[in-house]
Amino acid sequence: MKTKQLLLSTCALILLATLSTIARADPVILTLPPSVIVQAGGSAGVIGTLANQGDPPFNIISWNINLGNPLLTFDDTGFQGAPLVLNSMEQFGPTNFFDVFADITLAPGNYVGTFTVMDTARNLDVTSTFVITVTQGQVVPEPASMILLASGVGGLFLARRRRHS
């Protein structure tokens, strides 16, 4: 009977020790704005922070940006300046991580994007999801419309000048 209690107590302690390490929150935090607004044909910067609030160091091996539509593209030059390693209690940012570009033909609406930073040495990925709101681009008159408008105004000017002389 005592052996059975000892065995159960040992199993309970091992289980508690294992669960506490599994349940521990990930100390690496990636913070991005919840939404980004960009005009069709324009761009917007995405400012973020990557912080390691615990041990061991976080090795920035690679990252991935998914914007949910091929007409949304990005320039991640800002994040390329990130340190290769974030030691305990270090952070990178707030700074411009990347820019989002919306093609002029992209329909207005909401698109979901994700940004993931990977540490393959620790087998740890940190992901942040955000919404990209695309608004209608400004309508730019085409050159033929401008020529037609100019010829109409010029014709009115000549007609008025002829009437006064």
Image: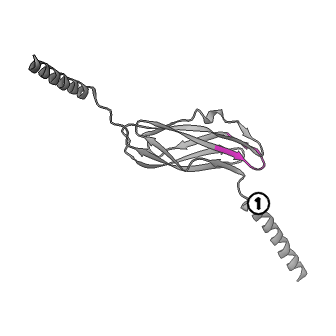
Q: How is the image coloured?
A: one colour
Q: Is residue 60 left or right of residue 11?
A: left
Q: Which residues are magenta?
A: 49-60
Q: Residue furthest top?
A: 165
The local secondary structure at tag 1 comes to helix
Q: Say if residue 119 shows up in the picture.
A: no
The quadrant of the picture occupied by the C terminus is: top left
Three-letter amino acid code at the position of disc 1: Thr
> Vertical placement of 25 versus 66: above or below?
below
> Vertical placement of 111 versus 148: above or below?
below
Q: Residue 11, image x and y in percent?
A: 81, 71
Q: Residues within 10 Å of mark 1 (few under 14, many from 20)?
A: few
Q: Residue 85, image x and y in percent?
A: 73, 39
Q: Is residue 135 left or right of residue 10?
A: left
The quadrant of the picture occupied by the N terminus is: bottom right
* Residue at the spot 54% in from the left edge and 47% down from the top edge: 114
Q: Which residue is mark 1?
A: 21
Q: Residue 37, image x and y in percent?
A: 47, 44
Q: Is residue 133 magenta?
A: no
* Residue at the spot 77% in from the left edge and 46% down from the top edge: 89
User: In terms of depth relative to the viewer, which is nearer, 95 or 123?
Assistant: 95
| Residue 14, picture quadrant | bottom right
